[in-house]
Amino acid sequence: MTDCIIRALAEPFRQDMLQMIAQAFVKDDPLARSQGIKESEFHDFIDRLYDDFEVGGLSRVAIDSSSKRIAAVVLAKAHLFEPSEEGSDAIAAIITAARDLYFSGYAPPAGELMHIHFVASAVDYRRRRWVYPLIADCLAAGKGRGYQKAVVETSGIRSRNLFEKHFDFRARVNIDYTSFEWRGNFPFRSIADHGGLTLMSRRLD
């Protein structure tokens, strides 16, 4: 079995990373599936945010040492306080609702919080569990840069278990998919078996 090489996200990895994460999220993420997100839409969304994820030095990619393919990615950056506003779509709305409940008006000072936004593994690499050392390296980078706490939103049972059982994250807020209402609709009832969107956190010190 080949090994993975962990690297900080950088421009040479950009296009391969975008293709891999778009394929993985549209296929596996409960929120993306529920809203019929297309690969091209997610690809372009992450591409617009790319510079934010690269500049802070927290995001990581796992590269197959044999094939040189990008096998997994963690996209993370400093958490920046942004005034709450109505989400432009149902996914943005439920994420905003979770953050509003968690922060409850508190604006973390710069450098206090790191935020893991996306974790993805290429389909044919999932059994190798390369996301585990990738997340660990991401958290170590955050701690090394002086962040006190890490936060993440998980959208399904598998991702929630990953962060809770292997990285000591604790659930702080859960927005139930069955009861979440947006603009008169209940957009996530089709994924009710996943429970809800869960905002989790852990200390890094």
Image (cartoon, rainbow, N blue to C red):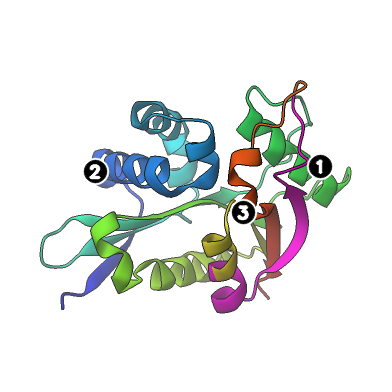
Query: Which of the two discs, 3 and 1, sits closer to the camera?
Result: 3
Is 61 left, or right, of 202 in this rendering? left
Say above or below: 76 vs 95.
Answer: below
Percent x, y of residue 12: 23, 44
Rendered residue at 77%/26% (across/down): 85
Judging by the rendered image, the residue that carries numbered circle 2 is 16
**Kind of residue indicated by mark 2:** Asp
Is 61 left, or right, of 103 in this rendering? left
**Cα–Cα gap, marks 3 and 2:** 32 Å
Judging by the rendered image, the residue that carries numbered circle 3 is 193
Percent x, y of residue 84: 79, 31
Q: Upstream in the sequence, badge 3 or badge 1? A: 1
**Which stretch appears magenta?**
162-182
Within 10 Å of disc 1 (Cα), the crowding (few <14, some 14-19, many 20+) is some
Within 10 Å of disc 2 (Cα), the crowding (few <14, some 14-19, many 20+) is few
**Circle 1 SS class:** helix
Query: Relative to the observer, which residue lies in front, 75 or 129?
Result: 129
- Pointer 2 with pointer 1, Cβ within 8 A: no
- Pointer 3 with pointer 2, Cβ within 8 A: no
**Cα–Cα gap, marks 2 and 1:** 34 Å
Say above or below: 124 vs 88.
Answer: below
The answer to whether residue 72 of the structure is visible from this angle is yes
The answer to whether residue 148 of the structure is visible from this angle is no
**Kind of residue indicated by mark 1:** Asp
Q: Upstream in the sequence, badge 2 or badge 1? A: 2
Rendered residue at 29%/55% (across/down): 122
Say which quadrant the C terminus sits in: bottom right
Question: Is 161 a magenta residue?
Answer: no
Q: Upstream in the sequence, badge 3 or badge 2? A: 2
**Kind of residue indicated by mark 3:** Asp
Judging by the rendered image, the residue that carries numbered circle 1 is 100
**Circle 2 SS class:** helix
